[in-house]
Amino acid sequence: MERSMKLEEGVNKLVEELEQLKIKNRVLEILFEEVLECIVIVDTNGLVRMMNRSYAEFLGIKPEDAVGKHVTEVIENTRLHIVTKTGKEEIDEIQRINGHDAVTTRIPIIENNKIQGAIGKVMFKDIWEVEALYKKLNAANKELNLYKERLLSPIILSRAIYSPFIFFSRSLYKFSSLLAAFNFWVQ
């Protein structure tokens, strides 16, 4: 009797853990699909195991059409299969994909000191996106400098205008102090 209760407790605990894993798995699936970056995961043989919708749309295919194929059949000029062999990450590399110069990152998946596969990520689908961001940032910086200049110029101007008067009034004060001291000694 006691043994069957312990067994039932163990089974209930495993069922609860399984439910928690299902929830976590679903959350990860949603995150994987909803990120705007293009993401692909390959195994040690270079076979595509997962590809998110963003990447598939960028390539003009369906994610399920990529799964199971060698990554070189799906993504031109890829080095993801090489990363699974070398274990060396490749960060912010330019890769030509579908006529676009894309900024890509390839990272090995390592677990227990063993390569399990690799993750490929396209951060910018075309270099022009980076250039456009740079231009926006540069324009914002110029605008900020203009506002700073406009804000500070009245302060600088007022100092320039009033400085001689301040100097003159300080000099006048010192002179009057000296004159008062002189009058004190003369009398």
Image: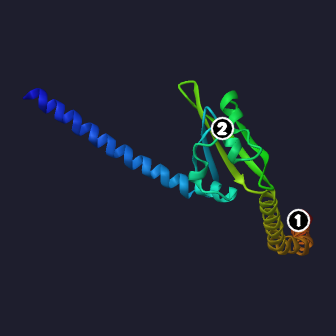
Front residue of 38 and 150: 38
The label nearer to you, 2 versus 1, is: 2
Marks 2 and 1 sit apart, C-alpha to C-alpha, by 73 Å
Residue 187 seen: no
Residue at 80% across / 68% down in the picture? 148
**Mark 1 residue element:** helix
How many marks are shown on the rendered structure?
2
Relative vertical location of residue 20 with respect to residue 185 in this rendering, above or below: above
Residue at (17%, 35%) from the top-left corner?
8
Among all residues in the image, which is located at the extreme top?
Answer: 113
Q: Quadrant of the N terminus?
A: top left
Q: Residues within 10 Å of mark 1 (few under 14, many from 20)?
A: few
Contact? badges 2 and 1 (CB < 8 Å): no
In the picture shown, does residue 3 fall above or below 148?
A: above
> Circle 1 sits on which residue?
174
On screen, residue 69 versus residue 32, left or right, reads: right
Which residue type does callout 2 highlight?
Ile
According to the image, what is the colour scheme of the structure? rainbow
Percent x, y of residue 16? 28, 43
**Which quadrant of the structure image shows residue 145?**
bottom right
Residue at 69% in and 56% down: 59
Residue closest to the eye, 3 or 144: 3
Is residue 135 visible in the rendered image? The answer is: yes
Q: Residue at the far left: name it.
A: 1
The answer to which quarter of the image holds residue 139 is bottom right
Q: Type of residue at label 1?
A: Lys
Q: Which residue is mark 2?
A: 107
Is 66 displayed left or right of 76 in the figure? Answer: left
| Above or below 137: residue 121 | above
> Which quarter of the image is occupied by the C terminus?
bottom right
Image disc number at residue 57: none
